[in-house]
Image (cartoon, rainbow, N blue to C red):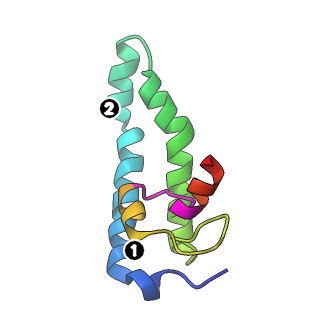
Amino acid sequence: MFSVHRGNFGSQFLKKQEKRIQTRIEKYNDPERIKEELKNGGLSDYTKYKQKNLVPKLRKALHKIHTNQYGYCEKCNQPIEIKRLEIIPAAEHCLKCIKVNNS
């Protein structure tokens, strides 16, 4: 595997991404919000979706940050675009590979 984006992005970017990811995990697993939803008839489809699909990807992204593998496409091993990572911190593929898959 390539060395992490530390050289490409710098440690400030990775710290910012780590914080962004942790904040999202906390948001989707907020016990008070979940308790309130359960009182009101059950978890919303939105919450269920985020917990089932997004939280695992966010945890995987955190693991990649901690193991110096964050920011590389899982298909072609090339760096994922910075803007994409800023918008989708758990992005697993670069835009080029996504376009190829959608063609």
Amino acid type at image mark 1: Leu
For mark 2, what is the residue?
32
Q: Which secondary structure lies at badge 2?
A: helix
Residue in view at x 37 percent, y 25 percent: 35
- Asked whether residue 93 is drawn in magenta, I would say yes
- The residue that mark 1 highlights is 14
Residue situated furthest bottom in the rendering: 7
Structural crowding at the residue carrying mark 2, measured as other residues with C-alpha within 10 Å and reported as few (<14), some (14–19) or many (≥20): few
Whole-number angstrom distance, CA of label 2 to CA of label 1 = 29 Å
Answer with left or right where residue 88 lies relative to residue 65.
left
Q: Secondary structure at mark 1?
A: helix
26 or 60: which is nearer to us? Answer: 60
From where the camera sits, is residue 94 visible?
Answer: no
Residue segment shown in magenta = 88-96
**40 and 20: which one is in front?**
20
* Magenta: main secondary structure: loop
In the figure, residue 31 lies in which quadrant? top left
Along the polypeptide, which appears first: circle 2 or circle 1? 1
Q: Is residue 33 above or below residue 20?
A: above
Q: Position of residue 50 (x, y in %)?
A: 47, 37
Left or right of 56: which side holds 18? left
- How many neighbours does mark 1 have within 10 angstroms: few (below 14), some (14-19), or many (20 or more)? many
| Residue lying farthest to the top in this orientation | 41
The answer to whether any part of residue 42 appears in the image is yes
Residue 8 vs residue 16, the one in the foreground: 8
Residue found 44% across the figure and 16% down from its top: 42
Residue 6, how many percent across, how many down?
45, 84
